[in-house]
Amino acid sequence: MIHEPVTETIGGYRFTVSFADREKPALMPDTIGHGGMIIHVGPEEYLVAGQGITVSVQPVGDGPPLAGIDNAAEG
């Protein structure tokens, strides 16, 4: 099981994925069934899908120091 956040650079952005529940943190969270994927579909365009994860993003390199989410759907 993964308990520590995972960080990967995809395109020009650094994504950090946490598998723990930020609302009810536990020392050893039950992360079975938690997971997701990040798909780079175009310049500055990504699709993120998953369950039981929290994703944060920040740009790397030159350019504006902030990144945001244009559209989100939860279901």
Image: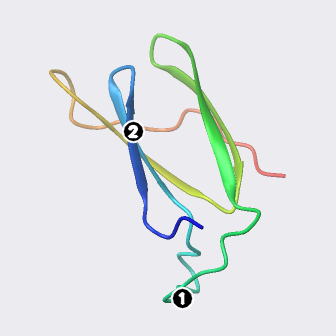
Q: Are marks 2 and 1 in contact (CB under 8 Å)?
A: no
Q: Residue at x 66, y 70 (%)?
A: 31
Does 60 sit left or right of 69 as displayed? Answer: left
Compared to residue 44, the image places residue 6 above or below, namely: below
Task: Report the label total.
Answer: 2
Q: Residue furthest right?
A: 75
Q: Where's the N terminus, which quadrant?
A: bottom right
The percent coordinates of residue 10 (x first, y second) are: 41, 26
Compared to residue 25, the image places residue 55 above or below, namely: above
User: Which circle marks residue 18 in the picture?
Assistant: none
The percent coordinates of residue 40 (x first, y second) are: 55, 20
* Residue at the disc numbered 1: 26
The percent coordinates of residue 25 (x first, y second) are: 53, 85
* Frontmost residue, 53 versus 59: 53
Q: Residue at x 54, y 85 (%)?
A: 28
* Frontmost residue, 1 versus 40: 1
- Which circle's residue, 2 or 1, is located before the other in the chain? 2
Does 37 sit left or right of 7 as displayed? Answer: right
Q: Residue at x 57, y 81 (%)?
A: 23
Q: Residue furthest front?
A: 1
Kind of residue indicated by mark 2: Glu
Give the spatial CA distance, label 2 vs label 1: 24 Å
Q: Residue furthest top?
A: 42
Kind of residue indicated by mark 1: Ala
Label 1: few (<14), some (14–19) or many (≥20) C-alpha neighbours in 10 Å: few
Does 63 sit left or right of 35 as displayed? Answer: left
The percent coordinates of residue 62 (x first, y second) are: 15, 21
Could you say whether the residue bearing mark 1 is in a helix, strand or loop?
A: loop
* Residue at the disc numbered 2: 8
Q: Residue at x 67, y 79 (%)?
A: 30
Could you say whether the residue bearing mark 2 is in a helix, strand or loop?
A: strand
Where on the picture, by quarter, is residue 60? top left
